[in-house]
Amino acid sequence: MPNARPIPWSMILRQTHTVVGMVIAPSILMFAVTGGLQIFRLQESHPGYTPAPLIEKLGRVHQDQVFAMRPPRPPRPETARPAGAAAPQEAGKPATPLSKSLLQWFFVVVAVGLFLSTLLGVWMGVTMGRLKIVARWALLAGTVIPVAILLIP
């Protein structure tokens, strides 16, 4: 019986990881950015703030998987307050508890870390190893496929 070489599973796993990572990397980058913006609801209009149209559209892709702006909401009717009811807070938004603020900023750091780590993985995938050309095609496919799907009416 000839001496058969064992299947190099670690190499197969590493190559599969590279190709799959290149296909999903553009979506991970988009979700890291839009998720980071959504932590502070920057994709939504607030009194005194209107998001850039691209940020609003990318927020819709993140939440609803459509690249369209949300139709404007009709204004709320003013309702009379009962006598003795406290006036709504006029000085902007209510105070945010410290724990919520800390958690929001922690998640912003996580989103930035995810973005940078994914960029580093993309750079490694397209510049190192045996599968540079395959990795570049997989990255292109991972960019073009979701954009093409979003363009389907």
Image (cartoon, helix red, strand yellow):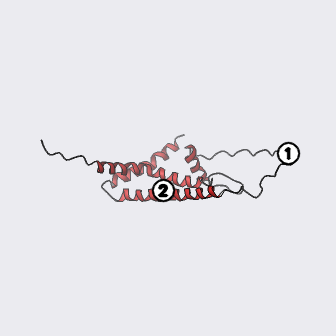
Asked whether, in this view, residue 98 is left or right of residue 146, the answer is right
- Image side of residue 82 versus residue 119, left or right: right
**Residue ID for mark 2:** 114
**Which class describes the residues within 10 Å of circle 2: few (<14), some (14-19), or many (20+)?**
some
Foreground residue among 114 and 65: 114
In the structure shown, which secondary structural element does the residue marked by tag 1 occupy? Answer: loop
Q: Nearer the viewer, residue 41 or 88?
A: 88
Q: Amino acid at mark 1?
A: Pro
Decide: few, some or many residues near mark 1? Use Cα within 10 Å; few <14, some 14-19, many ≥20: few
Marks 1 and 2, how far apart at CA: 49 Å
The quadrant of the picture occupied by the C terminus is top right
Q: Residue at x 59, y 54 (%)?
A: 39
Asked where in the image residue 52 lies, by quadrant, the reply is: bottom right
Residue in view at x 46 percent, y 52 percent: 26
Q: Nearer the viewer, mark 1 or mark 2?
A: 1
Q: Residue lying farthest right?
A: 83
Residue 80 shown left or right of residue 1 in the figure = right
* Contact, mark 1 vs mark 2 (Cβ under 8 Å): no
Reading the image, the residue beneath label 1 is: 82
SS label for mark 2: helix
Q: Is residue 59 left or right of residue 26?
A: right
Can you name the residue that lies furthest to the top here? 153
Question: Residue 98: horizontal and vertical position, in percent?
Answer: 64, 58
- Image quadrant containing the N terminus: top left
Front in this rendered view, residue 121 or 100 = 100
Residue drawn 30% across and 50% down?
10
| Residue 22 image position (x, y, % from top left) | 40, 51
Relative image position of residue 35 (x, y in whole percent): 55, 52
